[in-house]
Amino acid sequence: MAEYLANGKQSKITVETLKALLRKVGAAESEQRDPECPGLVLRVRPRAGVRWSYKGRLHGKEKRWDLGAAVATREGIAAVREKAARIREDLRRNLDPMASKTDAPPIVAPPASWNWEAGVAAFLVHIARTRRPDTYTDYRRILENTK
């Protein structure tokens, strides 16, 4: 990978670059940044192989997100660049890109509310079960005579 990073220049990551790196699996650990997509890094590691990752800042701390194994196809490179663009957009909004994103539950009409008589009847059943008979009589007189 040293030839790709020679003189501090960043060369464009292409299918040929990936094929060359995939032949060197097991070599010393190294990284290559993608100049077309800021934050996107191609990592070569002796045991893990060649993997894509995104390096960025979230809440003031530098973090790295793994984007999966490198695949030497144009579609694979394009898909990884799209993932990196989504991560970059989430980081601009100060959101964790790998946090689970769920859609809000659908809005459901609330159940029909009780009318006064049904509420009083249910409450008096509760009072009859949990309080003394005189308390029940007092509550019943008050509630049944309230408009």
Image (spheres, rainbow, N blue to C red):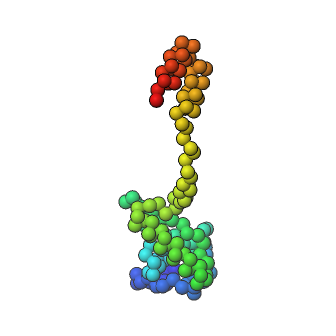
- Residue 92, given in percent of the width and then of the height, sits at 40, 67
- Residue 147, given in percent of the width and then of the height, sits at 46, 29
Taking 142 as reference, is 23 above or below it? Answer: below
User: Residue drawn 54% across and 54% down?
Assistant: 107
> In which quadrant of the rendered view does residue 27 lie?
bottom right
Residue 33 visible, this orientation: yes
User: Residue drawn 54% across and 59% down?
Assistant: 103
- Residue 146, given in percent of the width and then of the height, sits at 46, 26
User: Residue drawn 61% across and 78% down?
Assistant: 71
- Residue 61, given in percent of the width and then of the height, sits at 40, 60
Residue 44 visible, this orientation: no
Taking 20 as reference, is 65 above or below it? Answer: above
Q: Give the total number of marks visible in the rendering.
A: 0
- Which residue occupies the extreme left position in the image? 60
Q: Nearer the viewer, residue 87 or 108?
A: 108
- Which residue occupies the extreme bottom position in the image? 16
Taking 137 as reference, is 78 above or below it? Answer: below
Q: Nearer the viewer, residue 105 or 94?
A: 105
